[in-house]
Amino acid sequence: MTKSQARALLDGDRDAAARLAALPLKPLPTNFVERPWGGLRIREYKGVSPLDHQPRNPGAGLGEAFEIAAYDADEEARQYPSILELGDGSRVSLPELLATHGETLLGREFVARHGACFPLLPKTLDVAELLSVQGHPEGNPEAYLIIDADPGATLRLGFARDIDPEPFKRELTAGRADQQRLLDAVTLDAAALQTVLKPWLAARDDGVERVLPAFAGKLAQGVEPAVLVPLLERLKALYWSVLDSMNAIPVRAGQVIYNANPPRIAAAAGKAPSAEVHALGNPEGREILALEVRRPGPTFRAWDNVRFPLRAVDVDAAIDALNLRRTAPEEFLVEPQPVAGRRGVFCSVDGEAFRIEHLRPRPGALVDVPAEPPHCLHLLAGEVALERPDGTPLASLRRGEAALVPIGVGAYRARALGDGVELIKASVPV
């Protein structure tokens, strides 16, 4: 019986691996993950209709698409690995493929530095509600490339004032305890409680009297109505106090936001730049579609904006990881700059963790990419053909698709197949 291509590769077929190493590897574009804050705009962006095999939870949209996930040391990347569909229709996970043929696909130097994996975890985010207030360990900055955004959309990034850590930790811990008390005091399940509270919390000026009628007849045995008032008032006050402690940054399509400690703060701390505190999204529910580029690694959740059902938080780890000094919105906004000697190439981020280039070929024109270590490509707009310098076709990408470019591809060119191409190239230092 003839082996499938996937089976042959996993059994160590070096010739097949060498052939793959000479072509961009395009994972299936539907590596979706439902999140309580997710929307549905990501389906249109990727040109896919609802998928029968995709699990659905009531009230959960598709918050993320893992674009290139091949880093098993990261729990999320391991849970949602990128999948390749080969020419015969068989499928193989990208982490398995790299574990078997790492040096062939990535190169010996790259594997010696990073292991047989790809040390970035780019995702497309569809943010329709507030994400949690969170941070990451040292050396883990993030970049958000805004693909689309509702008018007036904002995200929270960086503290707008200096934060005293111990009182802040106590406030967040007490708020979490109040959430549990509220959940114990009512007969509503967690999802129903979220439905009741979400619009009331977002309406800053609405007093507790606006939401109390929703709890009529919904109190646990022995609980007096008066118990709810201080609980709800404290939770709403903390909800807005935490949001107001951070910068609200307006976002629009085409914007690049680099979430990293500003140089003045990183230099004073003597540490590798990492992400500032962030809570992507906004209480008004103005949707944001973005490509997030970051390294794999843990996320420390400090506060979940009074969301039900309760999700795990680690207040101490999150606050200890964060810069608590004041920042300003303009410290995170970056403008892609032309790269000298490379027509149609712009660079927005060139840091210790990753570099982001914007390839913008015009119709009928080409953008050249020299032979480089493995990197990933993400097409945010338009359609593009990739080809060898002699014009031999390699692959095509349409809006919402991504590719991992192995070491064997060498130099290549990007040809625009229409107007408005925005092709993102993300790489790590070697």
Image (spheres, rainbow, N blue to C red):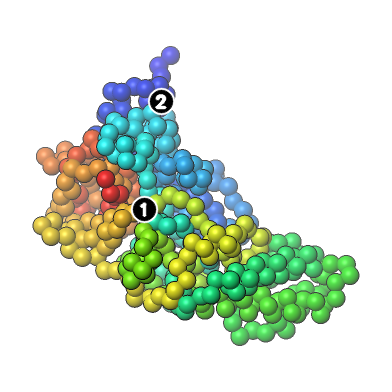
Q: Which of 253/169 is in front?
A: 169
Q: Secondary structure at mark 2?
A: helix
Residue at image position (47%, 58%) is 136
Labelled disc at residue 10:
2
**Which quadrant holds the C terminus?**
top left
Residue at image position (62%, 57%) is 312
Q: Which of 45/281 is in front?
A: 281
Do callouts 1 and 2 mark residues in contact (Cβ within 8 Å)?
no
| Amino acid beneath label 1 | Gly
Q: Is residue 384 left or right of residue 310?
A: left
Residue at image position (21%, 61%) is 346
Labelled disc at residue 232:
none
Instruction: From the image, tell me which residue sits under label 1.
Output: 400
Q: Is residue 57 left or right of residue 346?
A: right
Note whether residue 335 is visible.
Answer: yes
Q: Secondary structure at mark 1?
A: loop
Question: Tag 1: Cα neighbours inside 10 Å, few (<14), some, or many (≥20)?
Answer: many
* Residue 383 in the image, given as x and y percentages of width and height: 27, 53
Number of labels in the image equals 2
